[in-house]
Amino acid sequence: MKEQKKLILLAGIFLVLTVILSAVMIKKHLDQKHIDSLSGDQIVNVCEKDDLKGLTLLGPEGEKMQFEFSESHAVSKIIYMDKEFSSDMLNSVEVDSFLDSVLHFPIQNSFDGQNGDDEKYGFASPQYTVNLDKTDGSSSTITAGDLLSTKTGVYARVSGDDKVYVADYSLYQRLSSRFESFLNRVILNLERTDVKEITFERKSTNDRWVAKPLPDRTNGVLVEARYQVTYPMDREANDTMTLLLSSLLRLQIAQYVPIAEEDMASYGLDDPEYTLDIVLNNGEEIKLSLSMELGGYYYGICSNNPYTFRVNPATLPGLNRSPYELFDSYVIHGYLDDVSQVDVQIKDTSFVLKCRLNDSKTFESDDTIYQLDDRNAKVYTSNGDCYGLLLFGSIFNMPVSGVDYDAKPELTNVEATIKVVKMNSEITELKLVPLGESEFYCFINNHYSGFIVDRSVLYKDNGHELSGFGILDAYKLLTEAIDNKDRDNIYDRP
């Protein structure tokens, strides 16, 4: 009987202990559910972006980043290490993602804070502190302390809350984001109508050119962008320059690269290889400086953005081209349908080229006249290349190889004279005067033009390839073809 009473007593004690333990567990469970409900299913909701007028992130070694908000609750600018970045310089998607991740950060666990937690969890010397200034005049702070030993999370606190949170590692990653990830990689976003003039200079070659936008040319449904070069020649830009300038006005960089002032020389930015000055119609001036190519990139800095960067050379096609490869750099102009006659004298050799296209402007037609010294010059190779057009091209595709507007050559010792008569009776006379042994000064209508051409424009025989002939050698080849053509006006050089 006594044994039975003992068993009943022990059973009662066990029941009581079970009830007490269950109560404790239930309370702990309810407390955990209360934490979960406050944190929104393991998310600590600090505040909404719309509640903020300012946010300041303080990082290690005094790093400081300030976000300022407009009345529409968008980030109006960021001030980073005392440098100001306006909203149009920012990547809004990255900025909003950062704010959302910090203001609503996920947690793995939480527990009530105790005395001494500041030292224990790294809050006394936090890695990151986020100060929030709200539109209602209040403020709060998010503090990120030590990383977990497993590097899978970080201890965090929110002011006004006694909880210590074990935040996901993603919070630490966001807080330690490199500032350049917030910047827009399109550092120039200009319309052609914004631009008054663009000046280019290249240090190593002393190249310089100046260009300005022209009104668009409409070709059917296509709108063609156009630019006029005003220096070193007054000519229209070709497709290469047009593509370069279009790319420049929408310049997208490969990556922002922080370069300290003392390291500028190592990246070629103390004395840049390339300089582009863009003057806008509103008077604003933007200066872009780029290094020579280093490790597959140009390093640069732009006056509208205080951050250094690097650019993929493919982003600026034609940047390293000679100016004369970027615009129509021929000495004189002439087309088959507007040239009537060309008289040429090169030393003791002279000839006359005559051209009269038929009404349909068809060169190959029998009623089109194309003659060299009154002989039919429409002679072809068996591949269809025309010897007569080779001569025409050598005259009117004569490239300028340089300019010297300061030179004052005399019109003496003329080596070649080319007189062009247009269909409208306009006459242009080009005279070439020797400059040393390999170049000529160009005089147009007895006035020095400032243009210089290579000796090869007169004297160059390119062999069996019907291209790149000088005028005299193209004439000799055409004469050879006329003398030896067959009845079908075909001649192939032996």
Image (cartoon, grey):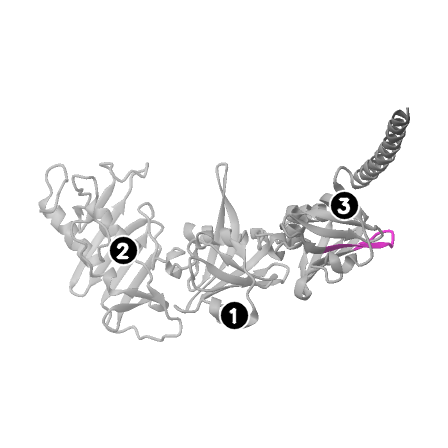
The numbered dot on residue 110 is: 3
The residue wearing badge 2 is 395
Badge 3 crowding class, 10 Å Cα cut-off, few under 14, some 14 to 19, many 20 or more, is: some
- Name the amino acid type tagged 1: Asp
Q: Tell whether 172 sits left or right of 322.
A: right
Residue drawn at 81 percent across, 41 percent down: 35
Residue contact between numbered discs 1 and 2, judged by CB atoms under 8 Å: no
Residue drawn at 33 percent across, 63 percent down: 401
Badge 1 crowding class, 10 Å Cα cut-off, few under 14, some 14 to 19, many 20 or more, is: few
Badge 2 crowding class, 10 Å Cα cut-off, few under 14, some 14 to 19, many 20 or more, is: many
For the N terminus, give its image quadrant: top right
Residues under labels 1 and 2: Cα distance? 51 Å
Residue drawn at 37 percent across, 71 percent down: 404
Q: Earlier in the sequence, mark 1 or mark 2?
A: 1
Residue 433 pos. (x, y %): 27, 70
- Secondary structure at badge 3 equals strand
Nearest the eye: 316 or 138? 138
Q: Quadrant of residue 55?
A: bottom right
- Name the amino acid type tagged 2: Ile
Residue range in magenta is 132-144
Q: In which quarter of the image is residue 308?
A: bottom right
